């Protein structure tokens, strides 16, 4: 992401003192509550300042515009997902286990976020801003990299450019499927997730395995 993009969606100032860190956390907590109730598009910076009980200048001290607040909240969710993925794949021992873990992550992802209005609101906010949309793509790449490195330890011959492209694609689509499931009836959501897991099991390693054979 370019410098110009980061200037508008990045933190204007990173707090170092405990008091400043706490103030930033209060602002983000208030933003999360507003987004959960109204969505990103309805949130106003002045309303946020009132909800956080801070001067409007304190909000702009950290965030140049609303998109920067969305990024900060998105980063919290993305970091949690990446950490969970890394932890789950740290000790993977077989390709079959890797597939099982992908399916386990899908279940964890859905259970963690299907009733989380903040996550859904932030995600919808990223869909309407080109710079924020790029965050989703970069997040998919990081998750794909975690999985790809796990596979590399197990079967280095399988890790070519085609395998990475497929891993990247599946990583991004998992997020899209989870978000579709999260706004769907729970029974339908479960059927969609089960179908998606069947697709992953049938195709993630299929073409690569044929070439290796």
Image (tube, rainbow, N blue to C red):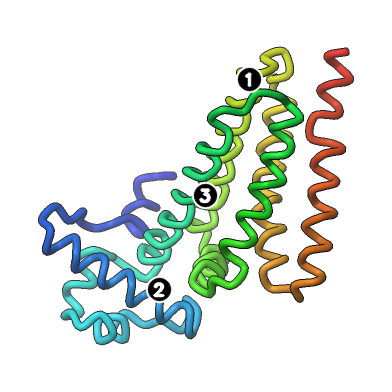
| 88 vs 198, nearest the viewer | 88
Crowd rating for badge 3 (residues with CA inside 10 Å; few <14, some 14–19, many 20+): some
**In which quadrant is the C terminus drawn?**
top right
Viewer-nearest of discs 2 and 3:
3
| 138 vs 5, nearest the viewer | 138
Q: Which residue is mark 3?
A: 81
Q: Which mark is residue 32?
A: 2
| 15 vs 6, nearest the viewer | 15
Q: Quadrant of residue 150?
A: top right
Please state the horizontal and vertical placement of residue 65, each as a whole percent of the image.
Answer: 33, 69
- Please, is residue 33 above or below residue 190 in the view? below
CB atoms at circles 1 and 3 under 8 Å apart? no
**Secondary element type, mark 1:** helix
- Disc on the earlier residue, 2 or 3: 2
How far apart are the two marked residues, 1 and 3, measured between alpha carbons? 21 Å
Please state the horizontal and vertical placement of residue 131, each as a whole percent of the image.
Answer: 48, 56
Q: Which residue is mark 1?
A: 152
Q: Which mark is residue 2?
A: none
- Please, is residue 125 above or below residue 71 in the view? below
**Secondary element type, mark 2:** helix
How far apart are the two marked residues, 2 and 3, measured between alpha carbons? 18 Å
Residue under the point 36% across and 63% down: 68
Q: Quadrant of residue 155?
A: top right
């Amino acid at each position: 992401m370019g410098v110009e993009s980061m200037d508008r969606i990045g933190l204007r100032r990173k707090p170092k003192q405990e008091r400043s860190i706490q103030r930033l956390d209060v602002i983000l907590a208030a933003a999360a509550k507003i987004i959960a109730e109204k969505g990103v598009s309805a949130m106003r910076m002045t309303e946020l300042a009132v909800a956080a009980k801070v001067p409007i200048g304190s909000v702009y001290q950290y965030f140049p515009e609303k998109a920067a607040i969305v990024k900060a909240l998105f980063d919290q969710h993305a970091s949690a997902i990446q950490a969970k993925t890394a932890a789950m794949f740290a000790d993977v021992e077989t390709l079959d286990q890797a597939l099982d873990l992908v399916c386990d992550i899908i279940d964890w992802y859905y259970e963690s976020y299907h009733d989380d209005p903040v996550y859904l609101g932030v995600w919808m906010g990223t869909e309407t801003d080109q710079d924020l949309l790029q965050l989703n793509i970069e997040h998919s790449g990081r998750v794909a990299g975690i999985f790809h490195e796990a596979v590399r330890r197990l079967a280095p011959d399988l890790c070519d450019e085609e395998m990475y492209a497929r891993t990247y694609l599946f990583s991004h689509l998992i997020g899209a499927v989870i978000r579709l499931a999260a706004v769907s009836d729970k029974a339908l959501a479960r059927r969609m997730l089960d179908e998606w897991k069947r697709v992953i099991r049938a195709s993630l390693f299929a073409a690569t395995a044929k070439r290796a054979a």
